[in-house]
Amino acid sequence: MRDITEGKSAEEALFQSEQRYRTVFDNMQEGFAFCQMIYDTSGKPDDWIYLNVNPAFNRLTGLADIVGRRVTDTIPGIKDQTPELFETYSRVAQTGQPEKFEIHFTPLGIWLSISVFSPEKEYFVAVFDDITIRKQVEEKLRMSGEKFRLLVECAPHAIYIQTRSRFTYLNPEALRLFGASSPDELLAKLVIERFSPEDYAIVEDRIRLLNIERKPVPSREYLCLRLDNTPFEVEISLVPFLSGTENGALVFMRDITARKQAELTLSRRNDELNTANAQLAATAKELKQNYEELSDNQRQLI
């Protein structure tokens, strides 16, 4: 007969796994929200319920005590002000295809960069960051050079300017991400040298589109290299920029290492949950069989 404590061990392992994932999500700089979509009688997205959020969610949105609540109760008017958010979240929750987008979140008056994916049908996970400052920088590109430089220097996001495929300016946060102690370590160096070789073709094509064709390019994730060649994952968006008389690009770079780790952790969590549930189901089935055998033996004795 199987030891009944095996089922208990599986439950304890599940609890310990939950604790590990909670620590990962709590340490994320990006906001994290696990939600369930709610549909009306015609099958259209009508609401969603917050099942779990991390501290960064509260910090970035200013919202508290929302777990278990509907978004329409938490943020009145959100459905009318941002109907595209309902459509996107519902599409991901139904199809399972992840999406990434930027939105001016009118109810809170901020810009958000959002990555959303679905761990199971009718549920979604939104990971987001406040990009309001970046949007303000883009809007103020016509500011005088000194005011612009002050704004960029104080920005919490990594920003650099490239012309002729080389670094011509990096703000303090960009220097920190690349592991440089001074601008001289990177200025005039080829930008592509700070990217993983597997991204070379993509980086060169994007530089060409910006510098020559003056076309905007969508944001994308890359694997970058610090000066000591330590890899780190980033999300980069670029806009055409005129540096003096030369065409170049204003580049916004955000470290997403913690977010990628959280996504990987969530995937592993789902795998472990499935394994633990399977073990519990197997234990329950065997216990039931043992009980039925014991009952048959008792009846035979009677």
Image: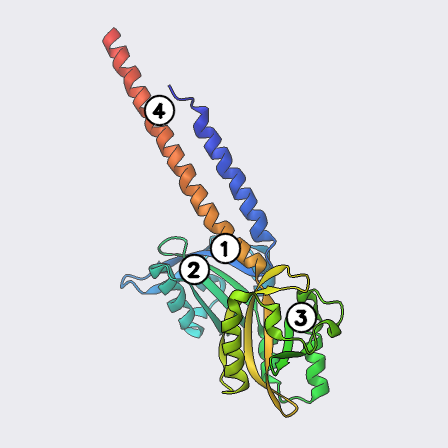
Q: How far apart in space, not on screen, are marks 3 and 4 (Cα)?
A: 59 Å
Q: How far apart in space, not on screen, are marks 4 and 2 (Cα)?
A: 38 Å
Give the labeled residue for mark 3.
174
Inspect the image, locate mark 1, and give the three-letter code of the amino acid beneath it: Glu
Q: How far apart in space, not on screen, are marks 1 and 2 (Cα)?
A: 9 Å
At mark 3, the secondary structure is helix
Work out whether mark 2 precedes mark 3 in sequence or the reverse, and give the earlier one.
Answer: 2
Residues tagged 3 and 1 counted as in contact (Cβ below 8 A): no
Q: What residue appears at the point 60 percent right and 60 percent down from the top-left corner?
A: 231
Name the foreground residue: 83 vs 147. 147
| 1 vs 4, front mark | 1
Name the quadrant containing residue 287.
top left
Q: What residue appears at the point 63 percent right and 79 percent down from the top-left corner?
A: 166
Q: Residues within 10 Å of mark 4 (few under 14, many from 20)?
A: some
Q: How far apart in space, not on screen, are marks 1 and 4 (Cα)?
A: 36 Å
At mark 1, the secondary structure is helix
Inspect the image, locate mark 2, and give the three-letter code of the amino acid beneath it: Phe
Give the labeled residue for mark 1.
263
The numbered disc on residue 117 is 2
Work out whether mark 3 precedes mark 1 in sequence or the reverse, and give the earlier one.
Answer: 3
Work out whether mark 3 precedes mark 4 in sequence or the reverse, and give the earlier one.
Answer: 3
Q: How far apart in space, not on screen, are marks 2 and 3 (Cα)?
A: 28 Å
The numbered disc on residue 287 is 4
Work out whether mark 1 precedes mark 4 in sequence or the reverse, and give the earlier one.
Answer: 1
Residues tagged 1 and 2 counted as in contact (Cβ below 8 A): yes
Q: State whether residue 259 is above or below residue 81.
A: above
Where residue 235 appears, as percent x and y from the top left, is 55, 68
At mark 4, the secondary structure is helix
Q: What residue appears at the point 59 percent right and 48 percent down from the top-left corner?
A: 23
Residue 108 makes an appearance in the image = no
